[in-house]
Image (spheres, rainbow, N blue to C red):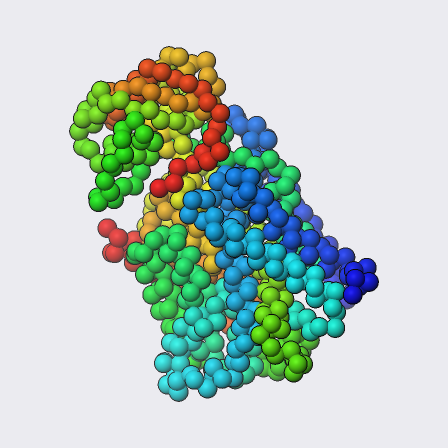
Amino acid sequence: MLNNLKKIPAREWAKIIILLGMGVYLAYTILSENLGNYINNTRFVWLTWLAGGMFFAFGLVTLWSNLRPQAPALPIEVASLMPKGWSVMAICAIPLALGFLIPSRPLGVESLTGTLSTNVSVSDTMVITRDPLKRNILDWLRAFSREADKTRFDGVEAEFSGFIYRNPEFEAGQFMVGRFIVSCCTADADPVGLPVYSLEADELADGQWVVVRGKFYADEFRGAITPILRVETLEAIEQPKNSYLYP
Amino acid sequence: MQNTTTLRKTVIWVAILALIAIFIYTLLDVGTSGATVSDRINTFTTRFLGIFIEAVPFLLLGSFFSGLIEVYIRREDLLRMLPKNPLLATMSGAMMGFVFPACECGVVPVTRRLFTKGLPMSVGIAFLLAAPVMNPIVLASTVIAFGWGEIVVFRFVITAFVAVSVGMLFAFAARPHETLLPVSFAPVRGGNFDIKLPEQNQGFGANFYRALRVGSDEFFEMGRFLIIGSLLAAWMQTRVSQGDLLNIGSGAFVSVLVMQALAFVLSLCSTVDAFVALSFLNTFSTGSLVAFLTFGPMVDIKSAMMFSGVFKKKIVAYLVIVPFLMTLLIGLWINIWVMR
């Protein structure tokens, strides 16, 4: 049977390599904790394992059926637009090529096509019970959007992390600390941020990850009264492995 | 004759290469945005792989189900169960996707196969248009993306309504020989449909193996459309700012047209288009999202081309235009009267 290995046509090899390669790529992405760069891995890691397993199964079955050519192979002839053959293989190899050749990186400040939003959707029944010092940007934005009187947060102490975002219209010392909210995958990534005030940060580059700690004071920001964090301590940090927030 | 074919092929290839060149150029053209070319490549790759990794499990499941159908379900038995009343039969045609889960790529050959077995036109058309949405996999992916709510209800009710309406149009106004290509009458030659399976291969293991075999071929058949769709969607998201989209997306009428055009051009697989639609949730009107989620699975570039392998040209035009107008009107109705 192994003699048949040499008889497998090149295009069948291409199929086998793409299918098994996808399985390897997905397993590698999960195990290297890079999956969080692409999808909401707290909710969907099982789907990715399932896909990896199915790619392996498909790949092995394709290999097996080529080793035993007498078994009835059942190619489904779907009416197709494109010439069957190498162009199909080339298209199907694109995810593998991009996945293995381009270093895995989450969306960051350089991925923004607009600005950071300060609006988040919040349901009426949602209760934010988390300890204020442990709240992330999303928790704070939700808390703010449910409170009509923004001065209610004056003097409240907070600590959160994110990337630095600046805009030409910001004053000196003013910037935003941003995160991407991802509910399913990067297709729905929604960049949000909290306004922050600290002269210390002027030497830090856009996109640098920081942990800021300070107290909120309501002030005008983009034409509305918004709690702005007056930073007391600021620390530059490495970008964390799972950099998105999941609603 | 030979020369014209060669010339046509050359023209098509030159056009494809030119489009790829424009795609890459516009992707890497950073202009004054302050981002570097490598930033662009990274952002594009992250967005593309995000859509692909989230979508591919559903495509694989769909491919595998398609293999199981091929192996286990005898369509002749199913036809015997169809109601005699044309309206009831058409309605059950729209529901048949829950038995044959297929996205819009898989549904075309299944429908053609059913026509060769004598399935009524109206039932086949309703199945063709509805099955890409009315099936358990799409129900699951839509619920995962949007949660239980008005989007899910709108998507399923409107798809069923449009599919049954168009199907009934054919029940009264068309005969098979006026609508179908001859190839859809006679048993398809050269495909797997003629192949008689050896009797000894009917055990569970052999059947499962064959289902996987068919499924892996289905992946290559449909996966390329998903990959091209994801590439285009990632390109859009890398290039177009949410603010620009918001400007177009705010009009009750124009937003529906824009999302329909997007659905047609992107040609996303119906099992995954909910995740793409989700990214437009905050920028586009509900009516336009519903139009995207109902019109896209019924008709898009690739399915319209595939229709022309089954139906005569005039019928293909009806199958594109009637669902387009119906979902446009329904989207508009949702925007103006239902949602605020």
User: Is B315 in front, or is B291?
Assistant: B291
What residue do we see at 29% from left, 41% from top?
Answer: A121
Q: In the rendered view, does A96 fall on the left or right side of B236? A: right
Q: Position of residue A215 (x, y in %)?
A: 27, 20
Left or right: where B139 falls relative to A79:
left
Can you give x and y, in whole percent of width and height, for residue A172 in the image? 37, 14
Q: Quadrant of residue B294?
A: bottom left
Q: Residue at x 33, y 24 (%)?
A: A159
Residue in the foreground of this view, choosing between A196 and B277: A196
Residue for point 21% across, 22% down = A154
Q: Residue at x 48, y 71 (%)?
A: B100
Q: Quadrant of the N terminus of chain B?
A: bottom right
Say if A131 sits above or below B50 in the image: above
- Relative depth, front residue between B80 and B315: B80
The picture places residue A238, in percent across and down from the top left corner, at: 49, 25
Is residue A171 visible in the rendered image? The answer is: no
For the question of whether residue B27 can be seen, the reply is: yes
Give percent across and percent down for residue B340.
23, 50
Count the numbered circles shown.
0
Image position of B326 with respect to A38: above or below: below
B224 with respect to B329 (left or right): right
**Foreground residue among A40 and A116:** A40
